Amino acid sequence: MNTTEHMTDVVQRYVAALNAGDLEGILALYADNATVEDPVGSEPQRGIEAIRVFYAKSLKLPLQVALQGEVRAVANEAAFAFTVSVEYQGRKTVIAPIDHFRFNEAGKVVSMRALFGEQNMHAV
């Protein structure tokens, strides 16, 4: 089983890698057979190469990511609220998702699901 400390550290490294635009740092957190469903209800990205393409698109614009509150981690799962600020064509938007990670026994993320909708996207 993963420790609370390990899962919290992975979340913090994820946020730092998003802020740095560090694609390889993000991918290092995932298992080769992981899935990413962002947002929930969209077609999941399956496997590390599909996840690479997804994050490469996401990182085309600089992101400002900040945790909102503490990481909730128990058993092999962690959830965390955060904000993503992005500026595109002079317009700034803040998105406020809650992400859910499920970990394998090796401590890698095997499932990421991002919960947010239009009501969580705000023009600033």
Image: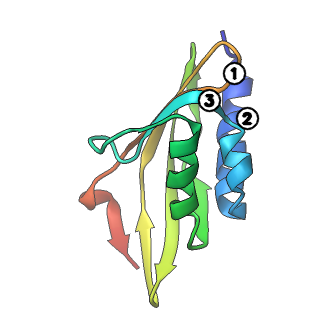
Q: Dot 1 corresponds to which residue?
A: 107
- 68 or 26, which lies in front? 26
**Coordinates of residue 50 in the picture (x, y in percent):** 50, 44
Helix or strand or loop: what does disc 3 sit on? strand
> Circle 2 is placed at which residue position?
9
- What kind of element bears circle 1? loop
Front residue of 10/60: it is 60
Count of all numbered marks drawn on residues in the image: 3
Q: Residues within 10 Å of mark 2 (few under 14, many from 20)?
A: few
Query: Do the residues under discs 1 and 3 have CB atoms within 8 angstroms?
Result: no
Q: Which residue is mark 3?
A: 32
Question: Mark 2 is on which residue type?
Answer: Asp
Element marked by disc 2:
helix
- Which mark is first along the chain, 3 or 1? 3
For the N terminus, which image quadrant?
top right
Residue plotted at (73% across, 35% down): 9
Q: Above or below — where is 49 with respect to 79?
A: below
Q: Return the residue nearer the eye: 68 or 2.
A: 2
**What residue is shown at x 58% (from left), y 67% (from top)?**
63
Residue at (67% x, 15% y) in the render:
2
Task: Kindly give the residue lying farthest to the front in the view shown.
Answer: 49
Q: Could you tell which of marks 2 and 3 lies nearer the N-terminus?
A: 2
Where in the figure is residue 34, as x and y percent of width and height? Answer: 53, 30
